[in-house]
Amino acid sequence: EAGVAQSPRYKIIEKRQSVAFWCNPISGHATLYWYQQILGQGPKLLIQFQNNGVVDDSQLPKDRFSAERLKGVDSTLKIQPAKLEDSAVYLCASSSQTSGGAYEQYFGPGTRLTVT
Amino acid sequence: GQNIDQPTEMTATEGAIVQINCTYQTSGFNGLFWYQQHAGEAPTFLSYNVLDGLEEKGRFSSFLSRSKGYSYLLLKELQMKDSASYLCAVKGFQKLVFGTGTRLLVSP
């Protein structure tokens, strides 16, 4: 079974530039998550999709971050414009269910973003 | 809201046993997860507890007390490859909230 795929793996941009990340979840997984992990901290949920609908985006800075999952499979996360504090690893995860039970999340390798 | 506390760093010797504690406060509870994260890599699932008690899986065990808002991860027969960060995460109604992680250093 293929895992969660993410690209690019690394990205360096200047502040005020735009950047986009792509995620392909495990086949058949209805729930997709984007996390931001700042060095030395645990992952923080940015947005959670169930199929192509948003379940939770309460911690997504909507003035600069956007995400979509148009066909309920792949997803993109965009930052525009980027700030220095956006430097982090952006992790995509997927799970087969979202409520109840030990439906563990499977994580992709992440995209390490550096904003200079 | 949810608040999760775990020690920042722990050290142990190869072959020893180590216990990593996690305390939490949450407005809703649908289980507690432990993840392992090696430096520069993605978190990987270790264990899940939703009822009180001990869950054992090979060298790793996880314990939960819901009344105390407390969990621990027990690692036995430590190996060098166990050097990693261990993340405690609590699931509310929908969302999984992670602690900051405990960095475990295993020395020879």
Image: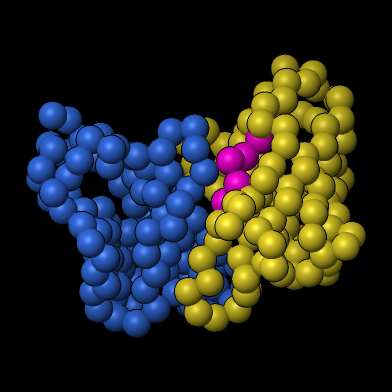
Where does the magenta region start and end? A107-111
Quadrant into which the N terminus of chain A falls: bottom right
Residue A50 as seen in the image, left or right of residue A92: right
Horizontal and vertical percent position of residue A38:
57, 37
Identify the residue at image location x=61%, y=53%. Answer: A2
Horizontal and vertical percent position of residue B62:
27, 66
Name the residue at the front extreme: A1
- The chain drawn in yellow is A
Identify the residue at image location x=79%, y=18%. Answer: A14
Identify the residue at image location x=62%, y=71%. Answer: A96
Quadrant into which the C terminus of chain A falls: top right
Quarter of the image holding residue A83? top right
- Please, is residue B48 above or below residue A14 in the view? below
Name the residue at the left extreme: B16
- The chain drawn in blue is B
Name the main secondary structure of what is drawn in magenta. Answer: loop
